[in-house]
Image (spheres, coloured by chain):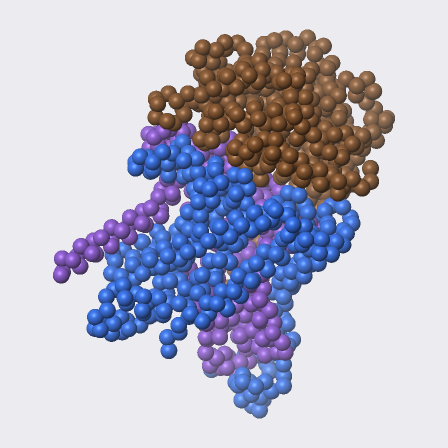
Chain colours: A brown, B blue, C purple
Amino acid sequence: MTTDRSPLLQRFSVLLLAALIAGGCSGKDGDAGGKVTVAFWHSCVSSTVPALNELIAKFEEEHPGIRIKAQYVPTGDALIQKLITSVQSKTAPDISWIHANFLQSIIDADAIYKMDDFIHSADSLSAADLADIFPPLMEEAKWRGTLYSLPMEATGIGLLYNKELFRNAGLDPERGPRDWAELRAYAKKLTIDKNGDGKIDQFGFFVPAFPASGPLGDWMVWQFYPFLFQAGGNNINGEQTQVLYNSQAGVEALTLWKEIYHENKLSSFGIDYEPAFASKQLAMALDGPWNLPRWKQIPGLDWMVAPMPKGPAKQSTIVGGEYLAIFKQSAHPKEAWTFVKWMVRPDVQALWSMKSGYLPIRHAVRLIKEYNDYLDAHPALKTYVDQMDFAQVPNPIDYDALKISRHLAEAIERATVGNADPRAVLEESAARSNALLKASSGKATR
Amino acid sequence: MTAPAETPRVIPPAELPQKVSTKKPKGRSDLSSALAFLSPTLIVLSAFVFFPVVFSFYLSFHSWNMFSSTESFVGVGNYSSIVQNPEFWSVLKNTAVYTLGTVPLNMVISLGIAYFLNKKLAGKKLLRTAFFAPVVMSSVAAAVIWRWVYEPSFGLLNYGLSWFGIPAVNWLNNPTSAMFALIVMGVWKTFGFNMVLFSAGLQGIPEHYYEAAQIDGAGKWKQFWNITVPLLSPTTFFVLVMSVIGSFQVFDTVYVLTSGGPLGSTKVLVFYLYEQAFKFFDMGYASAVAYLLFAVVFILTMLQMKYLRGSIHYSS
Amino acid sequence: MKQKKVIGSVVLHLAMYGLALITVAPFLWMLMTSFKTLPDILTYPPVWWPKEFIVDNYVNAFSAAPFGRFYFNSVVIAVAVTIGQIITCSMAAFAFARLRFWGRDVLFYIFLGTMMIPGQVTMIPGFMMLYWLGWIDSYAALIVPGLASAFGTFLLRQFFLTIPRDLEDAASIDGCGRFGLLWRIILPLSKPALATLAVFTFMGVFNDFLWALIVVNSEEMRTVQLGLAIFRDRYQTDWGQLMAASVTATLPILLVFFVAQKYFIKGITLSGLKD
């Protein structure tokens, strides 16, 4: 009664062992034949990846000894976690996208170089070049005054709208709402129940209210900032002692969101805004340049991007960047720096902007004729680029950025979805944020 | 009995009788063999269960960001922050609401179905498969499907309700309906499991009890209350304890269906724990939360054992 | 009287089949949606039967996501852990059921005790250990912790205790060593219990979410469950693709269940009637 399972078992053990070994060794690629390989992690959406590949091809053409190996990592929590754990397992990339709100963790783990190490090296970047980069972007690239990254591209928020639906409602399709009052009026006019069955068939404006504890919580906060800026407010003070989002400006901004949300019954809006806009069930939404390729592909969609409506204090929008940091574990920091520095060149920025739809990081790009012509031919992109002149970044939050962002997100959710009083919820969140700031006020500067 | 060609050793007859008996060891402990047999399990469990349990306890008394090289001892600081944190209590409440919503409903439905499944029915296997199918699929897949079912404009539920003239509800958008939606999904996912347990329990009740009662003139309902329920009580007790423990640990479905929202109304204990540990990397605090979860589950189980054990009838 | 019984039976059948239909309705809804085009999906009132049957959703899900890779990962991990557990649990159960040694019962009760501890207590240090080992985002992280199981040991030990010892005694007279006893006598007799353990373990690992969520970061290491959950994270939900992915994630397990039903049932009842 002997069952001869041993060979089978043997085979499976070998498979198991192989899997373990394969799994354990997730190290970097070796360098192939004289060429240096630089691992580059990014979160470009799939519609932008072809453009990224073109960009990399151009770099490799100009730098025959270097090969860039790009790898996609989903942004947000996943990027943070992956970067931190890869540092620990010694499998960190050479270059990666990085965001201001988790710079602290990466710096704590002593994982990245200070940019000054490269800027003042033999392969230097001039002060003029640095000064030409949009100041808000430079601010975000720093942590407590020290530069740890350089921007690769910029993004912003504009007002995406459907011209056809505007026309149908008797609104001028060549421009968007100019200020908050118009935004509210337009949203109302464009929210229609076509057949009187009590179910809204077309929504005017999508207020991006998401569960604060969900994956889109931080995204919601990011889209709220332009309104906060436009009312003259900001998120935190420079000294890191107090949050500012509960100021009068914050209350006004949140009240606007709450009013539009409730007046237009956004609580019954089920699907995500992109399919809704694509199927003409949504007239206006906050959107960014990364989506330009997508809208272009949809036949029969008559759309445009307008600048953000002006707020009570000023016209503003948020600008964000994707920043590149170089990791200390890199075997090829010089080559990594070559790529980062190359990205800052005006002609490269122009090319990248035209291909990907991302916004350029510096003024000099506007001096390139080819780029200006391109913008004239692409008014939506032009709108985004023009907005760079009055775009702002939120003040950096040095410690507990994620938690403070969460407090703000909760306030936003409660005022919109929960229909609570904006001032009250902002005050409550601010109290919690300020308590955190107090607790970390003793921490040393880097 | 073939000649032991592989074992050259000749067994001395004197040793034979002792080897057969396993009652009292001859003094020869099997310790070395035992260690050999136990070592793989012991190594893995020590590394991933025993040590973590202890280390988690240790961590809960420290404040540690995990990426910085220092951890600081805070004594009961974490525990007191938790207890003073209104968010924790709201999370605990949400979990309790979820448990109170799912467990009784689940037990009634699963018992009812098990009861009727015990009767004369055609295609029992098919029925049982249908009822058990939700249990087998992953919680993530289930939540993904139900998210689609709950879709306000195009989902199955609102469509079904519209047949009865009930207006559409945005299930996942307001706190009350979101919890309700989660509960319904939770019951759907797990009642099959309890149904199987109840079925086994029901089948364990001897027929002659019912026959005797029938002769005595007792109706179906009376039979149910006076025979089925008491004799089923060990199973019922087990189902109750397991269900409570399980619903306190719900996570997957919450993560996919509601992400703890809206307005934190479906944020349950394990979701809160996950956030603290893996979004904010506050390992010490999170470990304290984990131990509190353990404590709550333990206390609930002990309470049930204490107060309900007495009502279990065992058939002799 | 007879008529009442017939009506009663009909009502019973209707009710039970009705309930069964309601129970499987979400599955059917998922299946139907997976074959629809996006306009068909985003239409009100919803239609059950697709106007146009397409398989694009399946194709896209496997290429875009990439679900093929996720599948591979899930299967490799589930198979590895299942085999691993069968090995380690049967060895440990053998020790508890057949060997005598100091501290045996105490150790067994400790095992039982750990079954009571919620997994969430061990997951943070577990994660940290993997982090220190540099195993995050690797197969090791998903396989090694699952290679042993107190529950599996318990299940097999209970079963082994029911096997009569005569066969073993005969074998040991023959000169069979302890491992031989396990390998040649006990395991072949334990096929039902092993099958139950295998089926449960496979299902548990294949369906696992939280642990994978914690230890996996990169796309190529994702499991099917992670793939499904994250598919949904982006604010662009392609319901057709998502349903196609869900169908492919669910169907294998349902099939396994249908074929091995009795092992599932047996396993559940075994764990339930432990007094």
Q: Residue at x 55, y 45 (%)?
A: B267
- Name the residue furthest bottom: B14
* Towards the viewer: C200 or C177: C200
* Towards the viewer: A48 or B299: B299
Relative to residue A388, is residue C28 depicted above or below?
below
- Can the viewer see residue C192? no
x%, y% of residue A217?
A: 59, 35
x%, y% of residue B240?
A: 45, 61
Rendering quarter of residue C100? bottom right
x%, y% of residue C45?
A: 34, 30
Q: Residue at x 54, y 76 (%)?
A: C98
* Towards the viewer: B273 or A232: A232
x%, y% of residue C82?
A: 52, 58
Relative to residue A94, is residue A281 depicted above or below?
above
Rendering quarter of residue A12? bottom right
- Can the viewer see residue B294? yes
Q: Residue at x 81, y 17 (%)?
A: A128
Rendering quarter of residue B177? top left
